[in-house]
Image: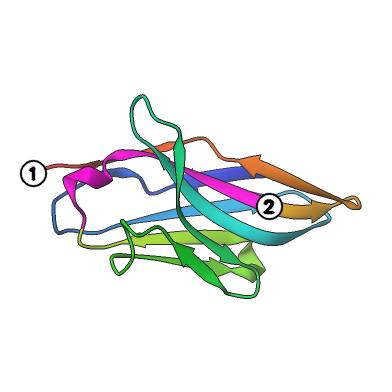
Amino acid sequence: VQLQASGGGLGQPGGSLRLSCAASGSDFSINTMSWYRKFPGNQRDLVASITSGGSTNYSDSVKGRFTISMDNAKNTVYLQMDSLKPDDTAVYFCNVDLFQYSSSWVYWGKGTQVTVSS
């Protein structure tokens, strides 16, 4: 399974950006897709997650500003980031927890840089 993320870049404070991440491969079923972010020198922190059934979870720092969604037919997760703050500047990673070949697997996409600056 491969994850292809897109949509990072430069956003302005108060503005919006949208990230997407598509999982490709064969014979798998997704349990949960998530977005993490990493600040320089820190570990990756969970930003938001969504199950295949649509249950969502957000970190307190983004609650009310970011919205995670998933297109099950396209195996794609989105992160709509509104009311951006400079503190949102980080490398964002998508993550998928899936079931394939009778086992559970976790995959990470390559990070995409998000910079919030005027």
* Label 1 neighbour load within 10 Å: few <14, some 14-19, many 20+: few
Name the residue located 76 percent from the left edge and 46 percent from the top edge: 105
Q: Locate the C terminus by quadrant.
A: top left
Q: Residue at x 56, y 40 (%)?
A: 109
Q: Which residues are magenta?
A: 84-96
Q: Residue at x 46, y 61 (%)?
A: 78
Q: Which residue is mark 2?
A: 97
| Image position, residue 113 (x, y; %) | 35, 37
Asked if the magenta segment contains residue 89, the reply would be yes
* Kind of residue at disc 1: Ser
Secondary structure found at label 1? loop
Picture residue at 58% right of the left edge, 47% below the top:
95
Image height of 58 relative to 97, above or below: below
Q: Is residue 107 magenta?
A: no
In this rendering, would 45 be left or right of 16? right
Amino acid type assigned to the residue bearing label 2 in the image = Asp
| Residue 105 can be seen, yes or no | yes
Cα distance, mark 2 to mark 1?
Answer: 36 Å
Residue 118 bears which disc, if any? 1
Q: Quadrant of residue 84?
A: bottom left
Q: Is residue 1 visible?
A: no
- Disc 2 residue crowd, few under 14, some 14–19, many 20+, Cα 10 Å: some
